[in-house]
Image (cartoon, rainbow, N blue to C red):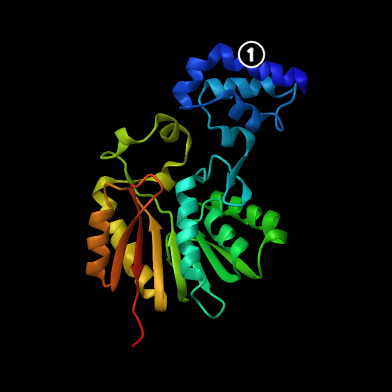
Amino acid sequence: MAVIDQSITDFFNEKKQELEAWYPGIKLSRLKLELLEFANEDNLEIIFQKLQAGVPLQYITGKAAFYHHEFEVTSDTLIPRSETETLVELTLVELKKIEKLPEVLDIGTGTGAIIISLLGEAPLNGMATDISEKALEVAKRNYLNLKPSLKDGSIEFRNTDRLEGIDKKFHLIVSNPPYIKKEGDKDLVHHQVKKYEPSQALFLNDEDYKNWFEVLFKDSLAHLLENGVFLMEGHENHLDDLKELSEKIGFERVEILKDLSNRKRYLKAYGQTSN
């Protein structure tokens, strides 16, 4: 282990400027934290080659910490991020208002981080959809691996686009959908993200953007139970337009919420309320 530790130190010191271009703010302590349990003499050179190519650390180690668990990640899934942990917190607030066992849908589940984290905190009946069959396989593995630490309930996984083919209703619908415009927002996305993370989970064609969310909002509203709530993560440049669109579609009340850096990041929309 001491030899591996020293090799990582030497590599970091030699390639520090190059590494910082790919991993802004990277520190030796973070690199060691990520790699020491994973690296050995047989794979160390390959790891260094991947680092020089800018491969995200989570794709190198195959794991990412999110909320209170560690999730498997692959190049078929987005890397779960701290902003989405706040989406989990916002959803938990709504979840705990429901007196019966909640029915919860996670659209575009990826690694399953959102729905699994929710089940880690409160009992629920969950469903998770993703258009990527490969991503869904990762989510299923995460669910099985983490199941012993979760609350009572279950998660059903569906390989579908948004809510296509779903015939039940939910108390809560949550989503971290693709919300970046492929052309209009491309200069705002870090080059590492564009190169390595799955574009299908990140980007929408500019000309399809409004229609894509119109379908999402219409279908989500139709699949909410009385007093149901829809929550999603979005891009600060587009949330005002999406708020207006969701209101036109029929959500009774729509709010834009901010993340920990005080940027517009989330949309919370209320479905039909009971009298």
Query: In x, y percent, where is residue 153?
Result: 63, 71
Quadrant into which the N terminus falls: top right
Query: In x, y percent, where is residue 203?
Result: 36, 45
Query: In x, y percent, where is residue 46?
Result: 64, 22
For residue 165, say whether it is visible: no
Q: Amino acid at mark 1?
A: Asp
Q: Is residue 265 above or below residue 127?
A: above
Q: Is residue 9 above or below residue 164?
A: above
| Residue sticking out furthest to the top | 14
The residue identified by callout 1 is 10
Seen from the viewer's position, the closer of residues 137 and 222 is 222
| Residue sticking out furthest to the right | 1
Left or right: where does residue 8 sit relative to residue 239? right
| Residue at x 41% of width, y 34% of height | 194
| Residue at x 44% of width, y 30% of height | 192
Determine whether the residue tagged by mark 1 lies in a helix, strand or loop: helix
Q: Is residue 185 above or below residue 16?
A: below
Q: Is residue 1 above or below residue 149?
A: above
Residue 40, picture quadrant = top right
Quadrant into which the C terminus falls: bottom left
